[in-house]
Amino acid sequence: MKVDVLTLFPEMIQGAIDASMMKRAREQGLVDIRLVNFREFSTDRHRTVDDYPFGGGAGMVLKPDPVFAAVDALRQGEQSKPRIVLLTPQGERFSQEKAYEFAHESWMILICGHYEGYDERIREHLATDEISIGDYVLTSGELAAMVVMDAVVRLIPGVLGNQESAKSDSFADGLLEFPQYTRPREFRGWSVPEILVSGNHLEIAKWRRWQSLYRTWQRRPDLLAKAHLTDADIELIKD
Ligand code: ADE
């Protein structure tokens, strides 16, 4: 998979890549990440990337020309079409489902904004998707791009050491993950649930599923309402 990030602060993203599993994924050739400073595509003397809004008002607006030019340069000679994702608080809320969708793509371009907003023509005529990572406003799209990139890259086959761990993630099946324990078996008087050390794999699987369902019901009833429950699940939660 190819991921291009259009950013005014490539060093910010570089640092995050180097400190995460994305570095190894890159070295193994599982993902090709390119960081593009779109200021380099500004044609005026001062390499301007933002300007005052037409109609007045506070703040600056990201100009369309350097962003379009950077995307044009990336697409030069390419046959395939990228998903062009604009990071913005106005976008669709990012989710595990969306992460899976992007992980199936062969090419994604993430665009990070920094100012009050984007010139609307970027939204209308360039972006294929607008993504928000939550209902809060960040000072820059870089942090949001890193969140999206991390969630997507870890789903690429081979990136995680153990593919099983992505399968049992919270949200992978629409439910929160069950509680996990490791050694020591007894810690400060708190012991690991007996069932987990029983060796009875069928009972352990049932316990975990019940915990997943219960935890989701307690913490995120909205997720439970959307989850696809099996007959066995209904049986588990009946009493
Ligand atoms: N840029 C600023 N805030 C953001 C958010 N919540 N999600 C995505 N991009 C952003």
Image (cartoon, rainbow, N blue to C red):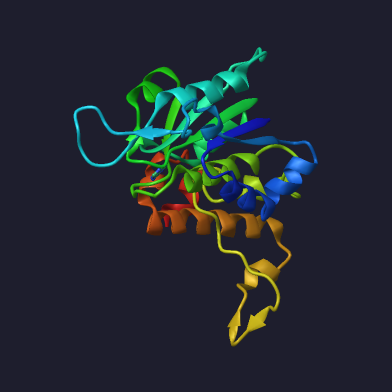
Quadrant for the N terminus in the image: top right
Q: Quadrant of residue 52?
A: top left
Left or right: 182 as drawn, with respect to 176: right
Where in the figure is residue 194, as x and y percent of width and height?
Answer: 63, 73
Where in the figure is residue 186, as x and y percent of width and height?
Answer: 65, 82
Res. 141 visible in picture: yes
Task: Give the residue drawn at x 39%, y 53%.
Answer: 220
Left or right: 114 as drawn, with respect to 80: left
Task: Give the residue drawn at x 33%, y 25%.
Answer: 120
Query: In the depicted view, which residue is nearer to us: 123 or 204?
Result: 123
Task: Give the residue drawn at x 66%, y 15%.
Answer: 78
Quadrant for the C terminus in the image: bottom left
Where in the figure is residue 213, as x and y percent of width and height?
Answer: 47, 53
View quadrant of ligand 1: top left
Task: Give the residue drawn at x 39%, y 58%.
Answer: 219
Where in the figure is residue 31, as x and y percent of width and height?
Answer: 71, 36
**Residue 238 vertical placement versus 74 (above, below):** below
Res. 164 visible in picture: no
Left or right: 183 as drawn, with respect to 6: right
Count of numbered labels shown in the rendering: 0
Q: Residue furthest bottom?
A: 189
Q: Residue furthest front?
A: 45
Query: In the depicted view, which residue is nearer to us: 144 or 172?
Result: 144
**Residue 191 vertical placement versus 68 (above, below):** below
Query: In the depicted view, which residue is nearer to us: 87 or 116?
Result: 116
**Residue 192 vertical placement versus 152 (above, below):** below
Q: Quadrant of residue 225?
A: top left
Q: Residue furthest right?
A: 28
